[in-house]
Image (tube, helix red, strand yellow):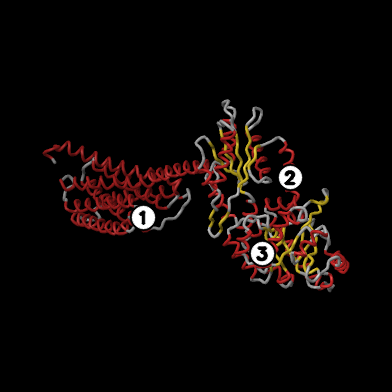
């Protein structure tokens, strides 16, 4: 080294390395001081104090070496021993000490204590060197022993640190590297007998690299890692903002744009050019009833399947969105012809021909579609409302799609108000039941009655079931309303029996929404138990036009049948799958719709259909109930056709439960008087 640098240059190089070591140690102390206010951990505080002590002792050692004397030489050795002990013991102490949070009070207190420790150490070193507490030989032996002890303590520290290398690899790697370099430095110092020799200078260089790695570890812990965490937080925040923006403008079920993005698009795009624009509103028929019956998760899957089918046939310039009400809105920003919109509606309806498979449910996706063309003085919200009004009106027609007309706005307002009032009607006990007797043509007795729901509105008066039942089905209220009807009817049938009337069967209609109800069988069983009504005196009526999966319906009806109740098909003959019902369903009775009976004596087609139903039922061993009997001629035809039961105004209109009880004999007498006009009168008895 002397040959390369010469003596003077070597001294300067040695001085530069020592100054850099002081810079590193002081930088660690200052960095720990600064970041302690944010981290407030004992480990950060101890590291800062340790390297503050090392830095001050290194400065003192550097100053002393600039005044070469016998006393200063001994002082330098003593300081070297103290630095080595502080570094190895302090390093090990920090590793072993559990991490805990402190307060700001500890920072000035501990740094002040470190300064006092340095001053006390310098004072003791001065005394030891001045009064020669140790002989020179013993002093050098002590120095060598301290080098070996320090190396051993650093080795223990490396073993302890290596256990955490998987948890914090970077920090541990740099700290282990620093410890290894200090061990090598200690070994070189042990070998060296002169600090200015090659071994002494090499030990200084390794010490320099050790403190460099210490600085890197502290910098990574206090600056780089927090910065990386801050950067990750920023990236996560940006990602979260993107997700929030997507969630704010998209439906979480179908991932389609939502109402907010639709209205924003309409506001920006509606008046941008002269192209004809339109909105197509699409809804799943009776969605509220389906949701109430099969549950939210299954109905959500159904809506997602519908959205996927619509998207599959969506032209490029059609913008599909979904509203919270379960409606799909298609915005068309360039309509060439009305026929183009009609063709798209036909395509949408065609895609729904195949049932939607939602786990065990096979659901028909019947859609109602409304179309509204944009006018010059129409806003985006008004255009959307017009399409929705047309969609509501489309529920009433067979085609199920309709263009908006101005008259629809006034009609729908009253319907919306009625829907709101319907929600309060059940709680306010505005519903009641009437019962229409069914006459057994073989015995002439009233053996059964049909329960019919009525609504007495506080201001509107009597509201027709033809008005409020469809609204109840659309709004989902049909589930609690149907349960109330069923329980009230069963309770009344039991009450008549307890009042002394002959046991009578009560017939109750089931809506489509109730058939989707998952706990329908359990609900019926619980009602029968609560009312103490024998199951054979309850008849549940399903409508032939209910289009459900045959397998699912069959299983449901068999479960109901297992309770001991009877199953009837209402409005028989008006549907399209009568033979399928008769073949697959465990039914007991067919009810001929009043539409066939009304013109039975004037229309040969109706006469032929009724005769066919009566004959078919007879061969299948099914009972037949004819509804809407108002004239003697109709009764005569049905008796001749061997019909089992009849109900209608000819015998009795629907009446209250009290009237049934009070006028039971009069009702029998009226039936007897009517039936005595026929030659079969002698076969009847009352």
Label 3 belongs to which residue? 616
Residue 227, picture quadrant = top left
Horizontally, residue 651 falls left or right of residue 207, namely: right
Secondary element under disc 1, as helix, strand or loop, is loop
**Residue 245 shows up from this direction:** yes
CB under 8 Å between discs 3 and 2: no
| Residue 645 at x, y percent in the picture | 76, 65
Q: Which mark is residue 324?
A: none
Q: Foreground residue, 470 or 223?
A: 470
**Residue 252 shows up from this direction:** no
Horizontally, residue 364 falls left or right of residue 218, namely: right
Marks 1 and 3 sit apart, C-alpha to C-alpha, by 81 Å
- Image quadrant where one finds the C terminus: bottom right
Label 1 belongs to which residue? 167
- Dot in front, 1 or 3: 3
Q: Is residue 376 above or below residue 148?
A: above
Secondary element under disc 2, as helix, strand or loop, is helix
The residue located at (75%, 51%) in the rendering is: 466
Q: Is residue 685 above or below residue 181?
A: below
Earlier residue among tags 3 and 2: 2
* Neighbourhood count class around disc 2 (C-alpha, 10 Å): few under 14, some 14–19, many 20 upward: some
Label 2 belongs to which residue? 415
Marks 1 and 2 sit apart, C-alpha to C-alpha, by 66 Å
Horizontally, residue 259 falls left or right of residue 666, namely: left
| Residue 102 at x, y percent in the picture | 46, 52
């Amino acid at each position: 080294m002397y040959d390369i640098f010469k003596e003077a240059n070597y001294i300067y190089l040695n001085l530069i390395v020592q100054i850099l070591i002081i810079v590193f140690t002081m930088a660690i102390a200052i960095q720990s001081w600064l970041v302690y206010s944010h981290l407030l951990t004992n480990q950060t505080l101890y590291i800062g104090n340790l390297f503050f002590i090392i830095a001050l002792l290194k400065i003192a050692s550097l100053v002393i070496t600039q005044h070469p004397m016998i006393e200063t030489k001994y002082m330098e050795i003593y300081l070297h021993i103290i630095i080595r002990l502080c570094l190895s013991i302090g390093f090990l102490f920090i590793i072993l000490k559990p991490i805990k949070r402190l307060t700001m009070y500890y920072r000035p207190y501990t740094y002040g204590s470190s300064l006092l420790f340095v001053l006390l150490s310098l004072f003791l070193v001065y005394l030891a060197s001045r009064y020669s507490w140790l002989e020179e030989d013993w002093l050098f032996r002590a120095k060598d022993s301290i080098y070996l002890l320090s190396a051993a303590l650093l080795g223990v520290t490396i073993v302890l640190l290596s256990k955490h290398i998987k948890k914090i690899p970077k920090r541990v790697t740099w700290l282990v590297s620093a410890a290894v370099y200090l061990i090598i430095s200690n070994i070189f110092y042990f070998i060296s007998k002169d600090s200015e020799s090659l071994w002494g200078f090499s030990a200084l260089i390794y010490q320099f690299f050790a403190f460099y790695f210490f600085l890197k570890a502290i910098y990574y812990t206090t600056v780089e890692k927090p910065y990386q965490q801050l950067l990750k937080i920023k990236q996560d925040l940006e990602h979260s903002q993107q997700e929030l923006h997507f969630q704010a403008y998209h439906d979480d079920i179908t991932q389609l744009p939502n109402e907010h993005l639709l209205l924003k698009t309409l506001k920006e795009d509606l008046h941008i050019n002269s192209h004809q624009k339109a909105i197509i509103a699409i809804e799943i028929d009776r969605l509220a009833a389906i949701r109430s019956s099969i549950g939210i998760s299954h109905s959500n899957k159904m809506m997602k399947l519908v959205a996927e089918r619509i998207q599959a046939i969506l032209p490029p310039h059609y913008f599909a969105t979904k509203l919270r009400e379960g409606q799909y809105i298609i915005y068309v920003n360039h309509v060439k012809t009305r026929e183009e919109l009609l063709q798209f509606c036909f395509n949408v309806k065609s895609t729904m021909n195949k049932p939607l498979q939602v786990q065990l449910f096979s659901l028909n996706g019947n859609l109602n579609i409304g179309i509204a063309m944009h006018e010059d003085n129409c806003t985006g919200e008004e255009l959307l409302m017009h399409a929705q009004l047309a969609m509501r009106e489309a529920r009433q027609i067979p085609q199920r799609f309709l263009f908006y007309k101005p008259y629809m706005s006034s009609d729908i307002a009253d319907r919306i108000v009625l829907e709101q009032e319907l929600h309060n009607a059940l709680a306010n006990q505005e519903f009641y039941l009437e019962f229409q007797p069914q006459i057994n043509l073989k015995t002439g007795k009233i053996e059964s009655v049909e329960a019919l729901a009525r609504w007495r509105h506080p201001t509107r008066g009597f509201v027709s079931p033809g008005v409020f039942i469809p609204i109840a089905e659309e709004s989902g209220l049909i589930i609690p309303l149907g349960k109330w009807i069923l329980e009230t009817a069963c309770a009344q049938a039991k009450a008549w029996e307890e009042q002394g009337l002959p046991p009578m069967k009560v017939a109750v209609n089931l809506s489509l929404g109730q058939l989707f109800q998952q706990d329908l069988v359990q609900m019926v069983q619980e009602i029968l138990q609560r009312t103490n009504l024998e199951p054979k005196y309850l008849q549940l009526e399903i409508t032939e036009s209910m289009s459900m999966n045959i397998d699912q319906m069959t299983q449901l009806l068999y479960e109901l049948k297992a309770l001991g109740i009877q199953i009837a098909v209402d409005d028989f003959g008006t549907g399209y799958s009568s033979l399928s019902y008769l073949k697959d369903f465990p039914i007991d009775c067919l009810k001929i719709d009043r539409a066939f009976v009304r013109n039975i004596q004037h229309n040969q087609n109706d006469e032929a259909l009724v005769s066919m139903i009566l004959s078919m039922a007879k061969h299948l061993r099914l009972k037949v109930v004819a509804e809407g009997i108002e004239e003697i001629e109709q009764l005569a035809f049905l008796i001749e056709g061997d019909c089992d039961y009849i109900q209608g105004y000819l015998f009795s209109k629907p009446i209250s439960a009290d009237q049934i009880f009070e006028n039971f004999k009069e009702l029998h007498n009226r039936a007897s008087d009517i039936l005595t006009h026929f030659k079969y009168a002698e076969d009847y008895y009352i």
